[in-house]
Image (cartoon, rainbow, N blue to C red):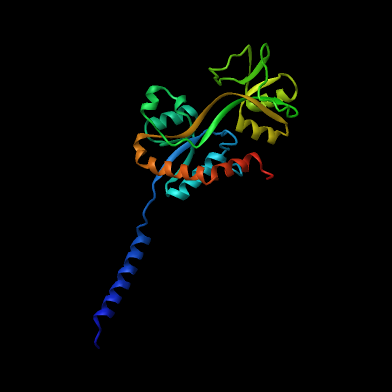
Amino acid sequence: MKFSFQLIAAMATVLTIGVSQAFAEENPIERPVLLTGQGEEGYRPFLFPTGAPRRGIYYEIAQRITDITGIEIRWGVYPATRGRFLFDRCKVQLEFGVSPTWYTDEERANSYFSEPFMTNADVIAYAGADRGLAHIPLQGEPVLAVLGYRYPTFEFDERLDVKSERTMIRMLEQGRAKAGILEKTVGQFLANEMGVEIHFAQEVQSTDLSLRVHPCAAEYLPSLNNALVELKSNGEIDRIMASYLNPAD
């Protein structure tokens, strides 16, 4: 039986494709993995406890980054001090939603920071009906603040520390203080969840939030930046945030 050169070439091509597919199935290309972490209780709505039905704004942004880049982002649960220890040694390569201003010079030297993808805004909050106030006079007034949180540019006449944002919102609702300082996204989410009407006046301080990337993972920074730019420009980050702050919409 005679075979043409064309037939032999076609058979060789089919055989090569079959071998290549079999090799690929037996030897899949492993996609890169970056590790990040959160506290056990999370920081809602940005991060929820691991067993919660929803995982939070940062978690969903991480999923979209993986969809775009193919870089898998895996989450661990660590106390803050343990997380810093692991990052310093490149056992954790990413920190989510942080500002370079939160770190010492030594820590920044061991870091790369991505394109900012959202803003952290600490604002004056008050309870009750919306009075359309852009500014609340606070001279001589006690102002609630979460214990341990620092506001270096804000001058307190009297600072009243509370243990959590939830405690502050409840105290504002009960009229035990005129105003308090809340991170705006956190305040909106918790007030909705608690069924308390709060509104916001003047800004106390704000900063852009980024990813902190360990130098051992610097090769992935351009891909992470490109993904964040895409998610901002196409409105996906805004849609994710709205799904937590306006769940009925």
Q: Please identify the quadrant where the C terminus is shown.
A: top right
User: In terms of depth relative to the viewer, which is nearer, 59 or 151?
Assistant: 151
User: In terms of depth relative to the viewer, which is nearer, 86 or 111?
Assistant: 111
What number of labels is visible? 0
Q: Quadrant of residue 90?
A: top left
Q: What's the residue at 38%, 34% (across, down)?
A: 214
Q: Please identify the quadrant where the N terminus is shown.
A: bottom left
- Residue 95 horizontal/vertical position (percent): 46, 34
> Which residue sits furthest bottom?
1
Q: Quadrant of residue 140?
A: top right
Q: What's the residue at 42%, 47% (across, down)?
A: 71
Residue 111 against residue 1 in the figure, above or below: above
- Residue 220 horizontal/vertical position (percent): 38, 42
Q: What's the residue at 72%, 31% (across, down)?
A: 197
- Residue 6 horizontal/vertical position (percent): 27, 79
Residue 9 against residue 239 in the figure, above or below: below
Q: What's the residue at 47%, 45% (across, down)?
A: 230
Left or right: residue 241 versus residue 110 is right
- Residue 211 horizontal/vertical position (percent): 45, 35
Left or right: residue 168 versus residue 204 is right
Left or right: residue 181 versus residue 34 is right
User: In terms of depth relative to the viewer, which is nearer, 134 or 194?
Assistant: 134
